[in-house]
Image (tube, rainbow, N blue to C red):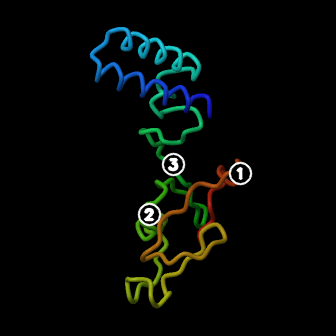
Amino acid sequence: TTQQLVAVSVLCRLLTVSLYTNNAMYSHIATFIAIAIMALVGSADAFFGGGGNSGGGSGTKLSMTKLTYNGKSVEVKEGTPLKNAVSKLGYKPKYSCKKGDCGSCTVTVGGSRIKACVGKVPPAPKLKSVQEKGLALR
């Protein structure tokens, strides 16, 4: 929020003043403001970019997508090469050029047409019912 940005800029100015003047008073004030900001934000993770609405956290959650074909279902990581995922399901598309130019390897995943030789597994759907059934492969 704007208040947090103002508080952080004040903290940075106090820290630079305390470093250049070598004054302990400024250092104590900067420490106090840092503690106050962490209390306002809620945690140290949010202060350092790991929480809140920042979206810049260092840890990423691996998202799994469920694919189904002929009653068989497989969960694969989002972004996995589609040719590997469809081979786990037992589906064998035709590969001609192996670089996505000809389109002979095109498969339909959840209603979207993707070239299996160069495409990636799409992210899991947001709807709970579709998540449970999985994305249909045709």
Label 1, on which residue? 127
Count of number-bearing discs? 3
Q: Of label 2 and label 3, which has the lower sequence position?
A: 3
Picture disc at residue 70: none
**Who's the residue at 56% across and 55% down the image?**
66
Q: Of label 1 and label 2, which has the lower sequence position?
A: 2
Picture disc at residue 88: 2
Tell me, yes or no, if residue 52 can be seen here.
yes
Please state the horizontal and vertical placement of residue 26, each as a whole percent of the image. Answer: 38, 14
Label 3, on which residue? 63
**Who's the residue at 42% across and 16% down the image?**
30
Q: Amino acid at mark 3?
A: Ser
Q: Are marks 1 and 2 in contact (CB under 8 Å)?
A: no
Mark 2 surroundings within 10 Å by alpha-carbon count, few (fewer than 14), some (14 through 19), many (20 or more): some
Foreground of the two, 53 or 92: 53
Q: Amino acid at mark 2?
A: Lys
Spatial CA distance of label 1 from label 2 is: 24 Å
Please state the horizontal and vertical placement of residue 83, each as a whole percent of the image. Answer: 43, 71
Spatial CA distance of label 2 from label 3 is: 18 Å
Q: Secondary structure at mark 2?
A: helix
Image quadrant of residue 94?
bottom left
**Who's the residue at 45% across and 30% down the image?**
48
Q: Secondary structure at mark 1?
A: loop
Mark 3 surroundings within 10 Å by alpha-carbon count, few (fewer than 14), some (14 through 19), many (20 or more): few
Q: Are marks 1 and 3 in contact (CB under 8 Å)?
A: no
Please state the horizontal and vertical placement of residue 24, each as a whole percent of the image. Answer: 32, 9
In the picture, measured across the screen, residue 104 lies left or right of residue 24, that is: right
Foreground of the two, 39 or 2: 2
